[in-house]
Amino acid sequence: MKTECSMLFLLFSFVTAFVFNNEIETGYKQVGDKFKTLLWKYLSKTSKPGVIDFLDFEEHLKSLKAHKKPSFGDYYILRGSLNIPYAEIVEPFSAWIDFEAGDSRIDFYGGMMKTYQLANEGDYGVMYRVAPMTTETVQNEMNCFQITGAGDSPVAPQGVIPDLDDFEHVSDEVIEGEDCQVWRNITTSGDKTNTYTLWLKKQDGHAVPVRYEMKGFNNILGSHYDHYYIDYEEFSPEKPDSGVFKVEGVATSCHEFPGPGLDHVYTFNPMKEFIYYHDKHVEDNFDQFKRHHKRNYHNETEQESRKNVFRHNLRYIHSKNRANLSFRLGVNHLADRTQAELKVLRGKQKSSGGYNGGLPFKYTKKELRDVPKAFDWRLRGAVTPVRDQSVCGSCWSFGTAGAIEGALFVKTGKLVAVSQQVYFSTDFVDFSSTFC
């Protein structure tokens, strides 16, 4: 026992001297708290468990120094893409970040939507959102909305690279043809275990991010509930020009955002959810969805499963809206339904039998022998996505639109989505139709 204590005391003194003399990292000066961590990390890697080779241990400490947590600086400019496989989203973005000045700007889809987070404007900072809007009187006019920070929720610049304070260097590997360090943070909260991984390389003496990935595992569901990653395509450690953070090119002055608070993350700072894993807005939206549609799930497992489906549908909705397409999406009664459940709704029931007024089938069984067992027009790109009629009571217009789309494809080889709304709209001028 005395031998073991003497050995540990000697080793503790050795580590203390090494740490203070070599200044591995400021945090390591809390030697009392770090000693066990350093020792156990060493013992977990050594080929002789329980045996301490002092020279080898010194090399282990030196390797820790070589892999001290990198910094990406107080400012940078980068371009990348946000990838969410579960929601089938690939969203390009560009970012100008200046923590030193308290400013950040992130553009999505090539500038279709621009977001600004300016910490030093006003008492508690201001967030701006600039995006084109179409109304009954204007088309694709750039508009600016703003949200003013408050004492309990001040505006802060939004980074697009995670803070590595809680990350550890776990390995080195090649990704996208680049030799990278791999830094990882595993966080457990309740029944969820989230694994965050950042791949980075060294270039011209500074750290360059390559990829950031999050994988979330839910112990209740027994499966992954979330997965996304960011590919960093261009990175420059230069200070952005201050003019980048000035809101320009809008039709009118910026005005307060009229929407509810639970939409602010998606509309003014979408990246916050993916860098800092902020999901309170998902919880709030899901609670509102349950109340509005009177959802009562059987148990906690189903509720977690439905919430995860809702999360990815919500991401899909807002990502497509940021792209400024010719349509806008919103949450409806199907937002917590899986693809398998929606697929069932696209089927048809068998007829009750008897003559239905149709012409007799003119081909004999002999003539049909060479016909393939299955033929799917969808595989040939001839079918548009299924639309939701809801309670509109206008099935005839949907059927007409589908027939025209199919005939047009057979004739021209091009799939064109035909608007069923046109068939029953009562007014084509001021969009005031109240029929549906």
Image (tube, grey):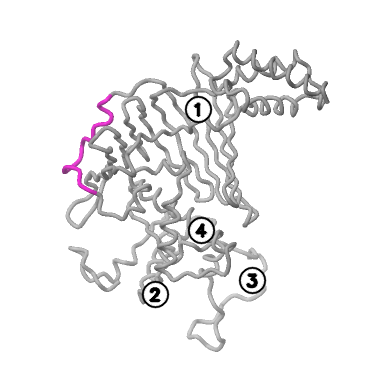
Q: Amino acid at mark 2?
A: Cys
Query: Image height check: is 30 above or below 376?
Result: above
Q: In the displayed image of the protein, which residue is found farthest to the front? A: 2
Q: Which residues are magenta?
A: 242-256
Which of the marked residues, 1 or 4, is nearer the chain's N terminus? Answer: 1
Distance of mark 4 from mark 3, alpha carbons?
A: 52 Å
Mark 2 touches mark 3? (CB < 8 Å)? no
Q: Amino acid at mark 4?
A: Lys
Distance of mark 4 from mark 2, alpha carbons?
A: 31 Å
Distance of mark 2 from mark 1, alpha carbons?
A: 52 Å
- The quadrant in which the C terminus is found is bottom left
Query: Is any part of residue 112 visible from this angle?
Result: no
Magenta span: chief secondary structure: loop
Say left or right for 9 vs 199.
Answer: right
Q: Amino acid at mark 3?
A: Glu
Mark 4 touches mark 3? (CB < 8 Å)? no
Q: Is residue 248 magenta?
A: yes
Q: In the displayed image of the protein, which residue is found farthest to the bottom? A: 354
Mark 4 = which residue?
307
Instruction: Kindly identify the residue that appears in the image at 20 percent across and 37 percent down.
Output: 249
Residue depth check, mark 4 versus mark 2: number of the one nearer the observer: 4
Which of the marked residues, 2 or 1, is nearer the chain's N terminus? Answer: 1
* Crowd around label 3: few <14 · some 14–19 · many ≥20 (10 Å): few
Between 354 and 22, the one nearer to me in the picture: 22
